[in-house]
Amino acid sequence: MPILDRERLTNYPRIILALYVVIYGFFIISGSGYTDRMGKPVGGDFSAFWASSHVLLTGKASDVYDDNIIFAVEKSIAGVDYRNPIPYPPTFFFIIGPLALFPYIPSLILWITVSFSVFLYVTYRFAPHALTIWLTLSFPGAFQNVIHGHNGFVTASILGLAFLIIEKRPFAAGLILGLLSFKPHLIAIVPLFLLVGRAWRTLAGLGISVFVLVLASAILFGIESWIRFFEKIPFMLYLLKGGFLQMHQVVSTVGALLLAGVPYQAAILVHLLFSAIGIGMAVITWYRNKPASIRHSLLVLTILLVTPYANSYDLTLLALPICWIGWEAYKDDSISSFDSFFLITAWFLPIVSVSLAALIKIQIAPFFILGMSVWVYRYNPHNGVPGPASRNPAWKR
């Protein structure tokens, strides 16, 4: 019996979604006021977004980077000392600016609903099948974003929307990609692949978009905001290097090795090695103009390998290669054991990797992502990868 049959793909996501509702509902109901069972604000990191919006609407934009001010606003939300600074540049203010126009809980609900709706639209457009809806609703990466109230849906949606139109409207795709400038540690590697892939119009759109956003943010929020942001970068690197973050949530190579007790210098060397391997494979696929599903999947996977500051909510990006490669297998009526392993593991990775890291201090995410990159690099969209395959998979019946 095939692992990915229609019955399992129909029933299991619904069961998992029901478990999410029960577990998250329990944590919320068993809390007090705006805090959950763990004593953290409902929505977790969203409190920093809402607090930043509050400062933007009531004070100076540069004060968003003043920890004392932000922490005070965060504490006023739920009455707990939840210290969560903002590590993003002023271009992020365009996204979070309106949040504090609404009370905290309605704003959180609106943030999750709107960003997830766009994310669901993107995944369904790439894999237009009823099963996609249930698989997206129950995707562990989605659950991570809901409980943390984070921006993973926004990140994945921007990349997804750009790749939806990149073939027919390359310049517009570049303009959309520029919206990802609020996460410079993720977008930094993207121009390289567009360059070697000779995607000149997309590259031009990306450059113009970033330039306009940076200029507009400097005009609207002041040069001082940018100065304060750059002053914040060494502190964020210090938190990572010193292991002061929630390290079980950090899914980068350097974060995984630091969690395991590897010295920082050695961890950086391994991180650079993994990054070089990922970049090399992605560059080759873009230079050779391999099928879009391969090029785009390797771009996303390499982003996760290159950034040292990848968190669990960033694994929402895995939904994109899952859709691209999974849909190719669906269309080709062919899925090998390799396909099943990587697609299933990638789907579960956002919750499995964090759980293992918390329990036994072993973060598997970067090692799996590197392995998945090799698999995608070798993948043939028309024949699958070498290995036994079902020519009439049950998940199509």
Image: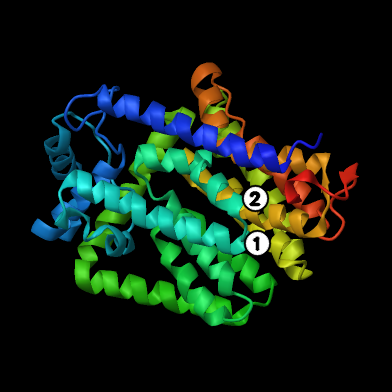
Q: Which mark is residue 296?
A: 1
Q: Amino acid at mark 1?
A: His
Q: How many marks?
A: 2
Query: Label 2 crowding class (10 Å Cα cut-off): few <14, some 14-19, many 20+?
Result: many
Please state the horizontal and vertical placement of residue 355, each as a whole percent of the image: 52, 25
Camera-side residue of 350 and 253: 350
Q: Which mark is residue 18?
A: none
User: Disc 1 to disc 2, how far (Cα)?
Assistant: 11 Å
Identify the residue at image location x=14%, y=53%.
55
Camera sees residue 30:
yes
- Quarter-of-image position of residue 117: bottom left
Q: Nearer the viewer, residue 368 or 308?
A: 368
Q: What kind of element bears circle 2?
A: helix
Q: Secondary structure at mark 1?
A: helix
Asked if residue 150 is positioned above or below residue 218 in the image, the reply reads: above
Q: Identify the residue shown where x is 52% and y is 38%.
A: 140
Q: Which residue is tagged 2?
A: 322
Q: Is residue 355 above or below residue 390?
A: above
- At x 40%, y 26%, the residue is 23
